Amino acid sequence: MPFIIVLAYYILTYFLLRLKGVPIPEVIYSMLLCLIAVLVAVLIVNFWWKISVHLTAVGGALGTLIGLSVIHQFDVSGWLYALLSLSGIIAFSRLYLKEHTSSQVYIGFLLGGTVSYWLVSAQIII
């Protein structure tokens, strides 16, 4: 239920910003769409199989960062190392606490990273 409530707020935020014509960069709209798409994917997958939402979030941040660096051609190596370290720490903790299997952790990270990278770098806007 919390994911559905958060998803509703993200969708509402996206469409209210669009309807009011708020002058913000298009990449912000892309990032909101990333959040919506990743949450929908997590909701769908979690009906049948539990994935790590923690790693999905960190993977999404990493995918967004890499997508932004592709678009704007800037160096993100410091942030890249920080996010990879953070994802390793979070993955270790989820496995250590036996909350997830390694495949659930990897799939969560890959889901967040690939969806976010694809949406930000392609600059898909509705």
Image (spheres, helix red, strand yellow):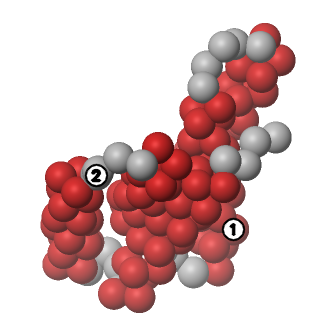
Relative placement, left or right, of 76 versus 41 is left
At 70% from the left and 30% from the top, the residue drawn is 14
Front residue of 90/19: it is: 19
Q: Residues within 10 Å of mark 2 (few under 14, many from 20)?
A: some
Q: Disc 2 designates what residue?
A: 76
Name of the residue lying farthest toward the front: 73
Q: Disc 1 designates what residue?
A: 44
Residue 1: image location, x then y, percent: 61, 48
First of labels 1, 2 by sequence position: 1
SS for callout 2? loop
Relative placement, left or right, of 103 versus 89 is right
Relative placement, left or right, of 126 versus 67 is right
Q: Quadrant of residue 109?
A: bottom left
Q: Measured along the vertical axis of the image, is residue 68 above or below residue 113?
A: above
Q: Nearer the viewer, mark 1 or mark 2?
A: 2
Front residue of 26/98: it is: 26
For the residues labelled 1 and 2, say whether their Cβ atoms are less than 8 Å apart: no
Give the residue type that dot 2 points to. Answer: Val
Residue 97: image location, x then y, percent: 20, 74
Q: Is residue 104 visible to the viewer in this orientation of the structure?
A: yes
At 47% from the left and 55% from the top, the residue drawn is 70
State the count of labels. 2
Q: Residues within 10 Å of mark 1 (few under 14, many from 20)?
A: few
Q: Measured along the vertical axis of the image, is residue 6 above or below residue 119?
A: above
Q: Is residue 52 visible to the viewer in this orientation of the structure?
A: no
SS for callout 1? helix
